[in-house]
Image (cartoon, rainbow, N blue to C red):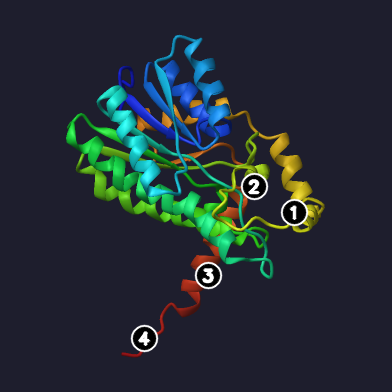
Amino acid sequence: MKDLAGRTAFVTGAASGIGLGIAGALAQAGVKVMLCDIEEAALAKAVEALKRTNADVDGVKADVSLKSELNAAADATIARYGKVHILVNNAGVGGGGPYGTWTDSGWDWTLGVNLIAVIRGIEIFGPLIERHREGGHIVSTASIAGLVSSGGAIPYNVSKYGVVALSEGLRGDLAGRGIGVSVLCPGFIRTQIVNSVRNLPERFDRPSEAGLAAMRSSDLFKFFQDRVSHGIDPSYVGELVREGIENDWPYIFTDVEFEPLIEARFAAIKQGFDRIRGREPRR
């Protein structure tokens, strides 16, 4: 999609952070953008700020982990703009924790927002992109943790690995339908992800205040909090995503910090094949 001007995009998690950076970069390129977020006040503020730049934007509140609300957001987008060309599945939470701290509710929330909502977004918006036959693009936000997993936040990593697998599989499936697919794998970006619990819906069990205090006092949390607070500007990520859509990049990275870890993972995988090379499988 070399010429983005006049196209329409739907962006989730768009009231702040990476989502707002993407919405801003697309709007600057002449794209009409429907911003979607669970935080109503922050969403209204983001929409108003972009409108002051003469951007053609609007907002719709939705909990993307609820299919009914995502469907309603799609209806609102079509009612407002008539078409959708670009889907950005960006909403995400930093849920989960190390082994021994997992809960059913924590898994349900993390997977519900980070993975299931992405699947449903594609199920809902994919046909809307197809029906106008003008082509389109889907970007889903994973993480560098979707390519290399550590033990600190395994549910989060599992959800992001799923987004990578989904995007890689869809890329071939949708190419013949005129739809490009990219997966965004950011490193440390200056967002509010370490405070994701602020948006925890009431239907999920809230961690105890003692549990939250213990988590926030841990060395691992403090490390991530510091790295995120000094992370890359989300507006720069937005520019990369815009470029990725224009040039149909399969993978969109934000920096090269974690490249050695990914290379080490690939080397370990190859070593696994080398161990059994030359052996005749038993049939």
> Which comes before the other along the chain, label 4 or label 1?
1
Residue to which mark 3 is pinned: 271
Name which residue type carries label 4: Pro
Name which residue type carries label 3: Gln
Mark 4: secondary structure: loop
Mark 3: secondary structure: helix
Residue to which mark 1 is pinned: 212
For disc 2, the neighbor class at 10 Å (few under 14, some 14 to 19, many from 20) is some
> Which comes before the other along the chain, label 4 or label 2?
2
- Work out how far the residue at label 2 is from the one at label 3, CA to CA, in angstroms: 40 Å
Name which residue type carries label 2: Val
Residue to which mark 4 is pinned: 281
Viewer-closest of 195 and 137: 195
> Which comes before the other along the chain, label 4 or label 3?
3
Name which residue type carries label 1: Leu
> Which comes before the other along the chain, label 2 or label 3?
2
The reply to whether discs 2 and 3 touch (Cβ–Cβ < 8 Å) is no
The reply to whether discs 2 and 1 touch (Cβ–Cβ < 8 Å) is yes
**Looking at the image, can residue 167 be seen?**
no
> Percent from the top left, x then y, of residue 265?
56, 60
| The N terminus, quarter of image | top left
- Work out how far the residue at label 2 is from the one at label 1, CA to CA, in angstroms: 9 Å
Mark 2: secondary structure: helix
Left or right side of 172 for 31: right
Q: Where residue 197 is drawn, which disc sits there?
A: 2
